[in-house]
Image: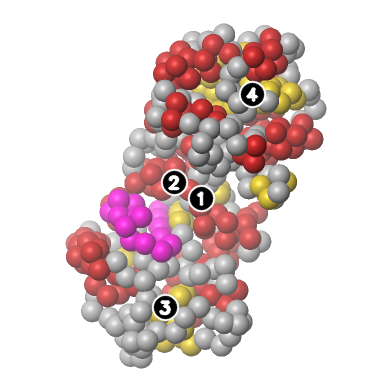
């Protein structure tokens, strides 16, 4: 999977050609105002390259989950307006409920080389988009005269939708953008050809969400660290008391299997040795909480584990120190609460302090690293939650698979 050898924007000539670019402008909005424009700025290198090369750049993206066709609150108009502030060329937003209707056709027809048109939310086409409808895919391709398609939306690459995969059937040339290339290089190399020692850190709430990731990473890494809510299912599998902690009883046998598999393969599997506990979520938010040792103290029957404890944080930080490659997906506790963010902060800090290649696998761990102020200390923060998880599972992502090989 590493070094996927796909055609990139550096391999194609777009001067005078119409280029459809699938970006990820699925930005958070509050009352029509963008609250975080990271996804737009992440797409800028590819957009600027195509503009500089004289392409007529047509951008498409989804935003949110409109349920019944077009909904004004899910319009891409605010994203187009923000993009216009970030580039030195003309940006036209094609307000068009069918995405590729008369407004879109007119806007594209009137483009000059090096200009940008932003199409309306692809999800306004409902199932035609999400079920990879051929008619919609063809209409998207026709809009750019079936010339060039560039895939730069890693966050949507795990979905075979009309705008991520279907459209490639109808265009002459396909390539990946710089953002996709970076994701493929970092995540692909980390999993397939890591510089060792390779440490993987998995957190988050449920074991069920990460079954295949755990299985695949035990094959690939030297040390696997487990934190977050999913750790309590592993602890219960080892016979420890876990009180009212989040546990998936149907996955206890699976956790036992993974513990045995790690031992058989000579891999280190690190689980919490102490845990922050409370009878319920702290109220007030900064209420005192206790830390209990997993073995000697036991988690009381009426309490739940909500974060890794201080000894565990030290144990995990020590494991990261000697690593050369670290992949982290999922927080160590309920990091949204400052009292329960200590474990996640400790892990983030240990990654920030290491010389290893550090890769944050999207989703909540990416949000945590950004929110806690460690973003600039990481080698790579993935823009895709679900996509990066599937990549770490070793799956082939449809939005990458459809792009031409070099």
Residue 358 shown in magenta: no
Report the disc number at residue 305: 3
Report the disc number at residue 362: 1
User: Where residue 301 sits: x, y (%)?
Assistant: 33, 87
Residue 11 vertical position relative to residue 263 in the rendered view, above or below: above
In the depicted view, which residue is nearer to us: 150 or 199? 150
User: Where residue 194 sits: x, y (%)?
Assistant: 41, 47
Label 1: few (<14), some (14–19) or many (≥20) C-alpha neighbours in 10 Å: many
Residue identifier under label 4: 96
Residue identifier under label 2: 386
In the depicted view, which residue is nearer to us: 361 or 263? 361
What range of the chain is rendered magenta?
A: 196-215
Instruction: Mark 3 or mark 4: name the one nearer the start of the chain.
Output: 4
Q: Nearer the viewer, mark 3 or mark 4?
A: 4
Label 2: few (<14), some (14–19) or many (≥20) C-alpha neighbours in 10 Å: some
Instruction: Mark 1 or mark 2: name the one nearer the start of the chain.
Output: 1
Instruction: Mark 4 or mark 1: name the one nearer the start of the chain.
Output: 4
* Residue 215 in sight: yes
Q: Secondary structure at mark 2?
A: helix
Q: Secondary structure at mark 3?
A: strand
The Cα–Cα distance between marks 3 and 1, rounded to whole angstroms, is 24 Å
Identify the residue at image location x=73%, y=11%. Answer: 110
Instruction: Mark 2 or mark 4: name the one nearer the start of the chain.
Output: 4
Q: Number of numbered discs present?
A: 4
């Amino acid at each position: 999977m590493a070094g996927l050898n796909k055609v990139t924007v550096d391999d194609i000539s777009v001067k005078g050609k119409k280029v459809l670019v699938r970006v990820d402008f699925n930005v958070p909005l509050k009352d029509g105002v963008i609250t975080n424009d990271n996804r737009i700025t992440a797409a800028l290198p590819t957009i600027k390259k195509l503009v500089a090369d004289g392409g007529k750049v047509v951008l498409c993206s989804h935003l949110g989950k409109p349920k019944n066709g077009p909904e004004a609150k899910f319009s891409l108009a605010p994203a187009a307006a923000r993009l216009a502030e970030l580039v030195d060329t003309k940006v036209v937003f094609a307000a068009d409920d069918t995405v590729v209707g008369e407004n879109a056709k007119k806007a594209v027809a009137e483009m000059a080389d090096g200009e940008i048109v932003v199409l309306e939310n692809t999800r306004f086409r409902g199932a035609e988009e999400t079920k990879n409808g051929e008619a919609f895919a063809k209409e998207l391709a026709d809009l750019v005269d079936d010339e060039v398609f560039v895939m730069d939306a890693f966050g949507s690459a795990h979905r075979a939708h009309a705008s991520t995969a279907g459209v490639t059937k109808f265009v002459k040339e396909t390539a990946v953008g710089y953002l996709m290339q970076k994701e493929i290089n970092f995540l692909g190399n980390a999993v397939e050809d890591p510089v060792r020692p390779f440490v993987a850190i998995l957190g988050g709430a449920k074991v069920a969400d990460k079954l295949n990731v755990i299985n695949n990473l035990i094959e690939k890494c030297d040390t696997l660290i487990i934190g977050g809510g999913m750790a309590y299912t592993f602890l219960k599998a080892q016979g420890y008391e876990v009180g009212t902690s989040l546990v998936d009883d149907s996955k206890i046998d699976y956790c036992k299997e993974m513990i045995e598999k790690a031992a058989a393969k000579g891999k280190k599997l690190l689980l919490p040795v102490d845990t922050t506990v409370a009878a319920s979520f702290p109220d007030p938010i900064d209420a005192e909480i206790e830390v209990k040792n997993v073995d000697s103290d036991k988690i009381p029957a009426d309490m739940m584990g909500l974060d890794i404890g201080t000894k565990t944080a030290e144990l995990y930080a020590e494991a990261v120190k000697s690593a050369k490659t670290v992949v982290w997906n999922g927080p160590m506790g309920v990091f949204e609460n400052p009292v329960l963010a200590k474990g996640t902060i400790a892990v983030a800090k240990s990654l920030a302090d290491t010389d290893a290649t550090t890769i944050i696998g999207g989703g909540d761990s990416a949000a945590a690293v950004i929110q806690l102020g460690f973003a600039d200390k990481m080698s790579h923060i993935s823009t895709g939650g679900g996509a990066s998880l599937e990549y770490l599972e070793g799956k082939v992502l449809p939005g990458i698979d459809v792009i031409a090989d070099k």
